[in-house]
Amino acid sequence: MRRLLALWTKEWIALSRDLHGLAVLFLMPAAFIAIMSLALSDTFGDRVRVDFAVLGPDAAKIAGELEGDGFRAAPAPANAAAARDLVRQGKLSLVLLAGPRPVVLADPALPQPQVLAFRMRALAVTLGAKPADLTQAIEVEVVGMPRGRLSSVQQNVPAWLIFGMFFVVLPLASLFIVERRDGTLARLVAQRVPFPLILAGKIGPYFLINLAQAALMLLVGRSVVPWLGGEALALPARWDLLLLATACTSIAALGWGLLVAVGARTLEQATVIGGVGNILAAALGGIMVPRFVMPQAMQRWADLSPMAWALDAFHAVMLRGGSSATLAPSFT
Amino acid sequence: MLSIDSVSFSYGEIKVLDGVSLAIPDGSIFGLLGPNGAGKTTLISILCGLRPPAAGRVAVERRAIGLVPQELAFYPMLTVRENLRFFGGVQNLGGARLRERLDAVVAFARLEGVLERRAAELSGGLKRRLNLAIGLLTEPDLVLLDEPTVGVDPQSRAFLLESIGALRSPARHILYTSHYMEEVQAICDHVAIIDAGRVLAAGPLAAVLGGAPSLEEVFLRLTNRGLRD
């Protein structure tokens, strides 16, 4: 135990003096969570504001009926040509050309679901109904969500937490390579320190760092994001499952770190392979782009990324209120 | 007596040690000489268990080994004290025994004034002294010194040589490699000259000298003057 303690103490001291490493492990994911949660908050909430205009007979009346649920009426352009120009310039997102055969002009930058939602509202108004009747006719219940609906912070905390956890690859692999290069590893072996003990000396501190990252990122979602104007993270009821998901993610991250440490010959190689590998795994695994927007073939490729498995597990716990039974497939 | 019997080792197709046999008497400082690529560092790595010999036998048993490698094998981001505590801790030294050994090697290598300094900030001579101190933490009975005076100023070199000489004790074997012949001639009582993995000469210093004025002359005669790298 004394030998293990010495190895752990050395890792702690080395990491505590590596300010860049600490920034990558703690500040980077915290910044991503804060920025992305705020940047995408309107996409998940009901605060989206899309400006639209109506041209044609009864334009003012139709515009009044279409307003609501994030759609805001703007002054009508002089004619259809002026409307097209405004949409092309990005000054208006949507224009309904009312008439016997209605047409919606849409800004190409507007997400497709919002174009579809506006078309549904326009259809309701054209058929003589109120858009509100449409939304009230069928109630939507988001199953398992703590607040009954998905929020940006709920999506972003697990995603960027996983991303940050995998960055233990950099300090872990770097020190390992320095030890190999400088002869300290040889010295430890010559001093008859068993190799499994050396490995345990590496894994233990970084496992605790991964747990600390998880605690800190939950705190950021719970306190910092609302302080900056976003929604607070709703914590899951099953803390044990959250811990299990975090521990399994940590084991995957540490495995990746050791693989890079063994495979890379130089510090430069470790930085490039570890850093770029993490970014690619994040892009593929649904951290940067949600998997549900990917084509079917890409979704199958996403299963290659350990970050995708981790994200599935965190979603099962934090979004779907899952049990250990629903969590199991993420790790098998 | 520490014996090395017919030890061979290859890196792939390249034979680095070819049936090396040496006898290192108890209480001796044994100088191992050879040009670059002769196999000295490989032999040391076999002696300290980093590599198994492809053939032959090394009778090291369960000796306490103190390795002082050619590289500065410590942690630059740790202080001198933290490095010593760490290497003591991983060798199972703790409590009063660790404090005692730490004080002893600090005094031996005269590191008292730099204990709280980070190893990265030390001068070349102090780094070499720390490297040596770490190797002596457990009072090893087999000390392997791989070019311990490389890259230091004459003052530090003289201090290191004096210190290594002071390590001599009846129950201890010291194996010393260096490219500085005058160093070896000054502190070693037995020497071996190896080249291309073979022993060219071995025995008491006087016998290897065989009347020659310097070890360097014997070395160059046996290994020839051609460049090796």
Image (cartoon, rainbow, N blue to C red):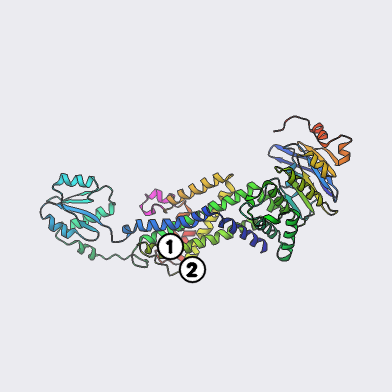
Give the amino acid type for the residue marked by disc 2 in the picture: Asp
Give the magenta part as a residue range. Answer: A288-302
How far apart in space, not on screen, are marks 1 and 2 (Cα)? Answer: 20 Å
Mark 1 chain: A
Name the front one of labels 1 and 2.
1
Where in the figure is residue A231, as x and y percent of width and height? 35, 64
Q: Is residue B118 left or right of residue B161?
A: left
Outermost residue toward the left in this view: A57
User: Is A91 placed left or right of B177 in the picture?
Assistant: left
Q: Residue furthest bottom?
A: A237
Q: Position of residue A227 (x, y in %)?
A: 38, 64
Which residue has dot 2 on it?
A: A240
| Residue at the image position 53 percent from the left and 52 percent from the top | A169
Where residue A254 sits in the image (x, y, percent)?
Answer: 55, 55
User: In what quadrant of the picture does the C terminus of chain B appear?
Assistant: top right
Image coords of residue B185 (percent x, y): 82, 41
Lower position in the chain sequence, tag 1 or tag 2: 1
Q: Which mark is residue A220?
A: 1
Q: How many marks?
A: 2
Q: Amino acid at mark 1?
A: Val
Between residues A11 and A303, which one lies in front from this camera angle? Answer: A11
Does residue A124 show up magenta in the picture? Answer: no
Question: How packed is label 1: few (under 14 Cα within 10 Å), some, or many (20 or more)?
Answer: many
Is A293 part of what is drawn in magenta? yes
The reply to whether residue A278 is visible in this rendering is yes
Task: Tell whether B157 sits left or right of A278.
Answer: right
